[in-house]
Image: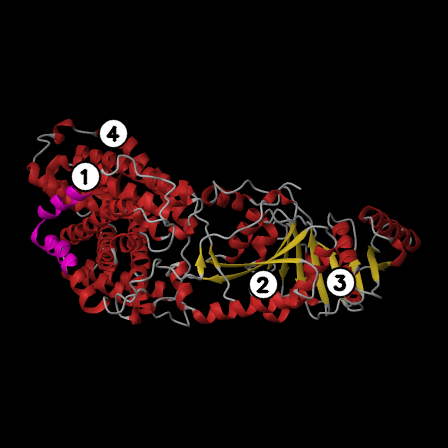
Amino acid sequence: MAEKHTLERELGLTSIIAISMGAMIGSGIFILPGLAMAEAGPAVILAFVIAGILVFPAAISIAELGTAMPEAGGDYIFIERGLGPAAGTIAGLGTWLMLMFKGALALIGGMFYLSAVFALPNVETVALIIGTILILVNIFGVKQTGGLQVIMVIIMVAILGIFIAVSLHNLESNQFFPFFDGGFSGLLAATVMVLISYGGVTKVAAVAEEIENPDRNLPLGLLLSLTVTTAIYALIVFVLVGIIEGEALAGSNIPMVDAVEPFFGYFGVVLIVLAAMLALISTANAGILTASRYPFALSRDKLIPELFAHISKRFNTPVIAILVTGGAMLAIILLLPVEEIAKTAGSFQIVVYILVNIALIAFRVRKPAWYNPKFKAPLYPWIQIFGILSGIYLLTQMDTLPLIGGVGILVFGVFWYFVYGRQRVDLTRDSILSEAITTSIETESAGDHLYRIVLPIANPAHQHELLNIAASIASTRENSEVICVNVITVPDQTSLAQDLQFDEERVKRQDELFEEIRAAAKNLDFKLRTRAVVGRNVSQIVLNLIDKEHADEVILGWKGRKKQRTHILGSIIDPIVKEAPCRVTLVKSVHQKIGKTAVFVGTGPYSITAVKRASELIDNVPETELTLINVQDTDQDLTDEELKAKGDRLIQQIIIDAAIDPEHVYSRTVLSDDAKKTLLEESNKFDTILIGASRSSSIERVLFGTIPEYIGENAKGNVLIVRGRERNIRSGIHLLKTFFKRQNSDSDSSSS
């Protein structure tokens, strides 16, 4: 039985706004104001506002379509489903080209800014070198950090806000007149040029599958980011026009440097160049990353050759799609001037936005049974009609090259579909995504009083041992459930759903793993549920699942050794252990036999929890003995008899507090001047050792002290390290993650 997959949703409202604004705030501020000023004069301010208004119909339409189809692919999916594969071909190719042109614009623009500080031999050559590096970064699958983008956007908005506030008192009112210096035609030309500044507003639709609570967050995030960015653009350009002489600003490739240098000198220039490089290179990299998903998706749907869907087995990235996308960006840099790149990118964007508006009308008219958007665009259909007509009008007013680009993509897209795609595409499919992929899964309500145990599994060799431990724990509760979760990880360079469809080998292995688990569970008396998740960050996925399922416990398999010394237990395990609000049991499994069991007890906060866990493990294992061991340090001002009595009293109190039957429990106090060595020696006398997690003063080992870690790494038998439920276990970093990513998730279940 093929397992249904859940696509991990981890993008909250703040992340959506950051993704959208991060994709917009780049060339629109650092490159285009000067070029657009040359077309429209001071009315360039109005051009940015008009462009934002013209983008609004597409944004509001995508918001509705996204809540009806919160899946991978964004505008391509919406248009393909609403208008058919021919229009989908146009949309896919158009968006692909638009993102390539936008990435090229950002790359060349970044080099112009770099040349303001360093004497570059040739701007285009350096842009090609940086572009090649970014292509390699995406091929190798280097992790892209969403959290870093949030921080960058916050820093960028702060810098721009300071720039606006400081510069307002330096405005020269005479520089705003004559306002319409370029006339109406100049205003239109400038509007077309700066349209690409808003190209990122709909970028989040391409990752709709990863958005948490998309019914609310997608429309709100789109509209907020568009509104805020339009206001920022208008204010920035207003300041630039007011403080830079018209002739100097018109045609400038580095308007922000021109604005800062007279007032802040070289230091201000360096800061602006640094900000511009961060924004523009980030935009260029995002252009390669996001644009490469479109040929991948088109190939997946048989609209272009299948080689574009090839996934490198070594890097797990769509190498051909990235190479073609990146190579085209480099060619654009070599062949076209900056202003033509901007205008041509805008023409492709207009075509896609027209199709998005038409697609929404098509859905509303046809009313398919499955189309049930939680958010509906207001003033339908007038907003969409306005978007369509204004887009067509702008296309007719474009220069020759952008007009050829916009009309050409329409003609070529239709031609290509009928020549190549029509006989290959499956016209009967009602979904772009495989039926094996679902974006939701039925779960029991949090109020059903189940004791839920989350059990991440990855290694078939140890799954039976982990299942046995989970079964032992579950058997002590009247109403319990074990949720086995396996994660297929996907790099940032591909969509979650797209990667899953083409990695049949990993899906097959996952199905086999779950079949083995279900077969093993038949012999164990507990309720089992499986979760197959597709995502990018295993630790965050498990933490999200713990929250959403209101889990009482998580059981983690551990190899007992670390690949990197920068991690205490492992790069995946560390965040879960530190941040999970539920009970945590870490298992180093050497053999299936529980056998002779010992618990190392002390004054730590989780000794009682470890004893209870040991009692649960051996409860269903006949003729198994349990021994509690306490080690007393001889470096105390007490006699050996007093130390032994102290240890015995501690053990007896723990037995009482743990509420276990003392009749079949052995106890022993050991005196030693080297606790680590003694505990390791004692551990090797038993088949299974349990030890409570400790709290040391070290921030790095805030949960697992050196002794539990040492025993876990070096003991020859099974080792279980146990940590109880925590109220305030989540670190400040995780709280920030929660704020940024998961504002609308269920309340944190961190109370006992």
* Nearer the observer, 340 or 742: 742
The type of residue carrying mark 2 is: Ile
The residues colored magenta run: 388-411
The residue that mark 3 highlights is: 689
Q: Alpha carbon of mark 3 to alpha carbon of mark 1: how far?
A: 71 Å
Contact? badges 3 and 4 (CB < 8 Å): no
The residue that mark 4 highlights is: 168
The residue that mark 2 highlights is: 457
* Nearer the observer, 359 or 721: 359
The type of residue carrying mark 1 is: Phe
Q: Quadrant of residue 245?
A: top left
* For marks 3 and 4 on the same chain, the one whose residue lies earlier in the sequence: 4
> Of tags 2 and 1, which is closer to the observer?
1
> Of tags 1 and 4, which is closer to the observer?
1
> Of tags 3 and 1, which is closer to the observer?
1
Q: Quadrant of residue 213?
A: top left
* For marks 1 and 4 on the same chain, the one whose residue lies earlier in the sequence: 4
Contact? badges 2 and 4 (CB < 8 Å): no
